[in-house]
């Protein structure tokens, strides 16, 4: 069945919206300059092409991603003015992420799926970068904006304006967002698709259990797969797919490998002296920055292991690392207070 396309539109997209880790929302760094870009429809069946970066172009100036292209809907790919303003590659910038020498360890997984969801009430953005652990680069991308299931149109418009209006991409969201159940269906098809260059990469198991094959999700925290996807599946009236039953929390890997505590993506990048790129809390940009942290970890010799796993869709996850990137609590005592990594009884860890 043919997939509906989007009519020609004129969309406001941010052209210089890189975030700075030390700037406040009111600082000059957080104000974006906007440019009008014309995009028309493209079949969602077409793949976003990831071109490997060569050493000579690794240090080219940062440009915002074309968010129609990440969803397979940009037809301005041959327009020089459009290409000058917007990037059409999700390749990870190697030059800023990797230290002088590489000491790559043998990995359990051939591919890592870097996921960073956006949306508190319901999921609004579902970006996944496919990272090849042998080539040490992003080789494909899946990116969809997600339309809420239970919100009214008016509430949705207000929510999106508050969330994405500051990035100048709220129009792109309205033009492309689809329901979560459709996102999952398309994502599973994407996992099975044949990719150019390396033959067919089979990321879903062939034995019918719908679990990942030689691949694992990488998230920045446990919230995405521990909390949000199960919640959204419930809201959307679908079962939790088995492929979401286990994941790698990059914060736990970071803590155990470097013996440094970093509560989030920005602090990890600060510790590694990797300048962040893009817009913080725009999921596709955050996914790229997490992939840059991942690249640095792999280049320094870290071995990526599953950090959390569910036995069944309805069971609570088991956390497999004893030393975890948890919050530190100030515990009051008669003699004063002390800090502890142990969560108070009855507390719930979400991210």
Image (tube, rainbow, N blue to C red):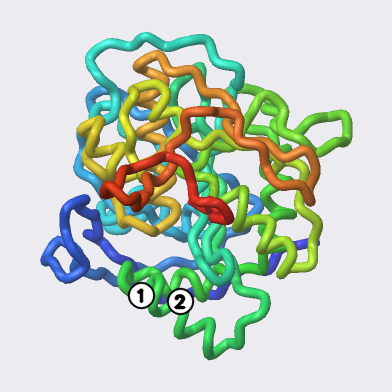
The x and y percentages for residue 205 are 79, 30
Placement of 233 over or under 87, stated as above or below: below
* Residue ID for mark 1: 165
**Crowd rating for badge 2 (residues with CA inside 10 Å; few <14, some 14–19, many 20+):** some
The x and y percentages for residue 16 are 22, 59
**First along the sequence among labels 1 and 2:** 2
330 sits left or right of 344 in the view: left
Q: Mark 1 to mark 2: distance in Å?
A: 7 Å
Residue 196 visible in rendering: no
Q: Name the quadrant of the N terminus.
A: bottom right
Q: Are marks 1 and 2 in contact (CB under 8 Å)?
A: yes
The x and y percentages for residue 159 are 46, 79
Residue lying at the far left of the rendered structure: 28
Residue at position x 58%, y 55% in the image? 346
Front-most of residues 252 and 180: 252
The x and y percentages for residue 27 are 13, 66
Residue lying at the far front of the rendered structure: 334
Placement of 13 over or under 127, stated as above or below: below
* Residue ID for mark 2: 160
Front-most of residues 156 and 267: 267
Residue at position x 31%, y 33% in the image? 93
Residue at position x 69%, y 56% in the image? 230
| Local secondary structure at mark 2 | helix
Front-most of residues 185 and 349: 349
Placement of 84 over or under 179, stated as above or below: above
291 sits left or right of 1 in the view: left
45 sits left or right of 100 in the view: right
């Amino acid at each position: 069945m043919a997939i509906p396309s989007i009519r020609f539109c004129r969309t406001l997209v941010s052209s210089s919206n890189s975030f700075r880790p030390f700037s406040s929302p009111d600082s000059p760094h957080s104000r974006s300059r906007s440019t009008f870009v014309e995009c028309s429809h493209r079949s969602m069946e077409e793949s976003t092409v990831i071109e490997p970066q060569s050493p000579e172009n690794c240090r080219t100036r940062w440009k915002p991603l074309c968010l129609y292209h990440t969803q397979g809907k940009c037809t301005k790919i041959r327009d020089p003015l459009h290409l000058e303003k917007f990037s059409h590659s999700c390749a990870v910038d190697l030059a800023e992420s990797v230290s002088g020498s590489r000491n790559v360890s043998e990995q359990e997984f051939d591919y890592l799926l870097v996921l960073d969801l956006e949306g508190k009430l319901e999921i609004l953005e579902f970006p996944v970068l496919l990272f090849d652990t042998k080539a040490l680069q992003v080789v494909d991308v899946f990116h969809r904006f997600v339309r809420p299931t239970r919100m009214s149109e008016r509430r949705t418009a207000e929510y999106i304006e508050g969330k994405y209006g500051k990035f100048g991409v709220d129009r792109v969201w309205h033009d492309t967002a689809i329901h979560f159940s459709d996102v999952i269906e398309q994502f599973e098809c994407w996992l099975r698709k044949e990719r150019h260059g390396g033959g067919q990469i089979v990321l879903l198991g062939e034995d019918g259990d719908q679990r990942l094959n030689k691949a694992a999700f990488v998230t920045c925290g446990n919230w995405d797969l521990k909390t949000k996807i199960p919640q959204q599946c419930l809201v959307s009236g679908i079962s939790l797919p088995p492929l979401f039953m286990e994941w790698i929390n990059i914060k736990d890997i970071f803590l155990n490998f470097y013996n440094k505590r970093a509560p989030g993506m920005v602090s990890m990048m600060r510790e590694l002296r990797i300048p962040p790129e893009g817009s913080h809390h725009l999921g596709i940009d955050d996914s790229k920055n997490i992939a840059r942290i991942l690249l640095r970890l792999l280049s320094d010799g870290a071995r990526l292991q599953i950090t959390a796993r569910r036995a069944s869709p309805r069971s609570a996850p088991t956390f497999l690392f004893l030393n975890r990137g948890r919050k530190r609590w100030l515990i009051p005592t008669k003699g004063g207070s002390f800090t502890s990594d142990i969560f108070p009884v009855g507390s719930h860890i979400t991210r």
